[in-house]
Image (spheres, rainbow, N blue to C red):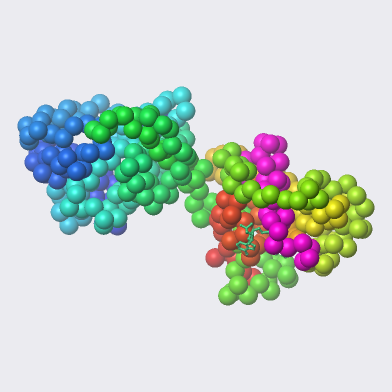
Amino acid sequence: MNTAGTHTIETERLILRRFTVEDYEDMYTNWTSDPEVTKFLSWPTHPDKEFTRTLLTEWVGYYSEGKTYNWGITLKCDDRVIGNIAVVERDERTKSYELGYCLGRAFWGKEIMPEALEAVIRYLFENEEDLSRVIATHDPRNPKSGRVMQKAGMHYDGCLRAAKRNNTGIHDTAYYSILRSDMVTKEQYAALFNEMHPGYFERDYVKNVPDDEPASEMLLRLQSFDGDIYEKTFPDDVTFGFYDGDIEALKEEVAKVVPHWVNFFGKDARIYCGFVSGKIASFCMIQDFGEHMVDGMKWKIGGPGCVGTVPEYRDRGIGLTMVRNVTQILRDELYDYSYIHYTYETGWYSKLGYTTFLTWTGSGIK
Ligand SMILES: CC(C)(COP(=O)(O)OP(=O)(O)OC[C@H]1O[C@@H](n2cnc3c(N)ncnc32)[C@H](O)[C@@H]1OP(=O)(O)O)[C@@H](O)C(=O)NCCC(=O)NCCS
């Protein structure tokens, strides 16, 4: 991978800049001398200022090699360093970087670290074309660090037992990651939407969606989908599967939910249902939305459409289990994303991990 190197990053309240050897006193005073700060870190508390100065001299030397990412964190109003954020591990094979950070105790609780972390993640993805993944880890007994990762938009991947060592000894390690594909901008999502639905806002039924009732579009990344996220136990007469019965019989059930949907359930539609004693309780179609380029990556997108549960079978978990099964089918068929188009049921789909990427009304994308 190319390395852009450590250049100044400005955020709303912070300047992240290269260290100079002269920073050693502030660095020592603010964090390297404080056992509370280093408790869950892998390096020991510094015994004196000279120790910090020696380390800093080494770090500053690395800048000239152009291969290091290592920033001192400063407040815009004060050039003194209050913390540090750096790439601490690289994996060329998976195009992955690990970030580490620490902050002087006097500056905790002010949302400084999430601001710095988010800015560095963005900088790395913008400046390293090949970079695919950024990770960060923490000791679960230090949950504050995990919250920093969450606030910076990172995804919790799991916890490895006794995987690392810090000043408290060998410890379990919580892993967070963010992928390039997680960094898609609002403009890129809008472009994807327009590509998938050309001329959308010229249609009458779309024009009529009022401004105070925005509809949502949702996505779920399938590689990380885990069907166990929603588990329901059903009596034996509840079953799930593809529908290959009479299409007119299906349309009768669809009409009980949203009458105009019957037009979408043609004989070529791929239909999946939940059944109670063989009768249709829930239904949807499995749609293929094709392949789309997003931020230089090809996304194969599919998704459940016209999802409904016949009123008498609602609130039993049948509808959501059906959507879960369809999501698993799409994952097994190697789709990259499952997509829900035009919904007001965001709370319901979010139980499976779907997230809203865009909202719209008759007047356009919000
Ligand atoms: C939306 C709809 C499909 C739900 O079907 P359903 O079979 O009753 O839903 P389920 O019973 O599977 O719901 C499962 C869970 O979601 C919860 N839930 C239901 N609606 C919810 C909502 N709007 N927000 C959050 N949770 C919701 C239920 O309480 C249940 O929780 P639990 O299993 O943890 O106790 C059904 O109400 C329907 O057909 N509505 C009309 C058509 C429609 O709007 N379809 C969606 C179009 S995109």
> Which residue is located at x 7 percent, y 34 percent?
48
- The answer to whether residue 303 of the structure is visible from this angle is no
Could you tell me how many numbered marks the image carries?
0
Tell me where residue 306 appears, x and y as whole percent: 75, 58
User: Is 360 displayed left or right of 206 in the figure?
Assistant: left
Mostly what secondary structure, the magenta segment?
helix
> Which residue is located at x 18 percent, y 32 percent?
44
Quadrant of picture, ligand 1: bottom right
Q: Quadrant of the C terminus?
A: bottom right
Q: Quadrant of residue 216?
A: bottom right
Tell me where residue 316 appears, x and y as whole percent: 71, 59
Residue 23 or residue 39, whichever sits in front? 39
> Which residue is located at x 57 percent, y 50 percent?
353
> Which residue is located at x 38 percent, y 35 percent?
173
Magenta stretch encompasses residue 140: no
Tell me where residue 315 appears, x and y as whole percent: 69, 62
User: Is 313 displayed left or right of 166 in the figure?
Assistant: right
Q: Quadrant of the N terminus?
A: top left
- The answer to whether residue 308 of the structure is visible from this angle is yes
Residue 30 or residue 124, whichever sits in front? 30
Farthest residue to the top: give it. 93
Residue 292 or residue 181, whichever sits in front? 181
Q: Over which residues does the magenta segment extend? A: 310-337
Residue 159 or residue 85, whichever sits in front? 159
User: Is 318 displayed left or right of 127 in the figure?
Assistant: right
Tell me where residue 22 appears, x and y as whole percent: 9, 39
Magenta stretch encompasses residue 320: yes
Position above or below: 245 against 176: below
User: Is 274 displayed left or right of 188 in the figure?
Assistant: right
